[in-house]
Image (cartoon, grey):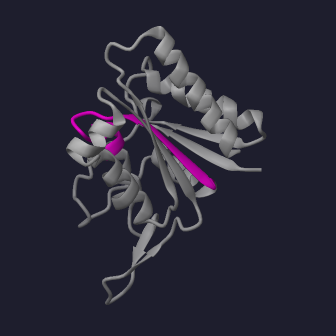
Amino acid sequence: MKKITIINGHPNQESLCFGIVEAYKKGAQSNGAEVREITLAKMSFNANLQYGYQKRIELEPDLLKAIEDIKWADHLVWVHPVWWGGVPALLKGFIDRTFLPSIMYQYRENSMLWDKLLKGKTAHIITTLDQPGWYYRLMYGRPSVNQLKKSTLQFCGVSPVKVTYMGIIRNSTDVQRAKWITKAEHLGAQLS
């Protein structure tokens, strides 16, 4: 049985991302997957990495549970909007506070190399945006994907990492949104 953790990075519980998460979860569970959710909008934590990496601040209970759910999973699904080319501040803060040395990766002593503590896991990033995915890729170099896929997940050993774009969200119709929800359900069903 596939173990999936879905990380919902949208701060607004009324957003399309919440519908995408529910649809993906439904599809995955329909094929027997076990699914856990990390919903940032419902969590209580300080998103500011106040001292950088000089001094670690104590992890709140919600972050400790999230780390447990990430380590438990075989497959991670990240659902978030693209804002100003990047991930929402809440999602960036979540990553800053949880993807820490000795938790998700570990630098080797006296070396430039590191151990990837999430090795063996796979991931899928599903982003909503207000431009076509091809345009975001060609014109801007898809900075949110580079940050999450390459600089975070692959850095910690997660591979492969697939990406699905859903957009243009602004001015989308109910029919188009329903198609994205159906697509999310099919993505979940295909993986499990």
Residue reaching furthest bottom? 110
Above or below, comparing residue 115 to residue 81 in the picture: below
Horizontally, is 148 left or right of 138 in the view?
Answer: right
Query: Image quadrant of residue 169?
Result: top left
Q: Is residue 39 left or right of residue 49?
A: right
Q: Position of residue 11 (x, y in %)?
A: 37, 28
| Magenta span | 73-92
Q: Nearer the viewer, residue 55 or 170?
A: 170
Rendered position, 188 above or below 63: above
Residue furthest top in the image: 174
The residue drawn where x is 54% and y is 20% is 179
Quarter of the view holding residue 107: bottom left
Q: Residue 77's spot in the image, x, y percent?
A: 53, 44
Residue at x 40% of width, y 54% of height: 149
The verdict on residue 80 being magenta is yes
Q: Note whether residue 49 is visible.
A: yes
Residue 130 location in percent, x, y? 30, 26
| Residue at the image position 55 percent from the left and 30 percent from the top | 21
Q: Nearest the camera: 83 or 189?
A: 189
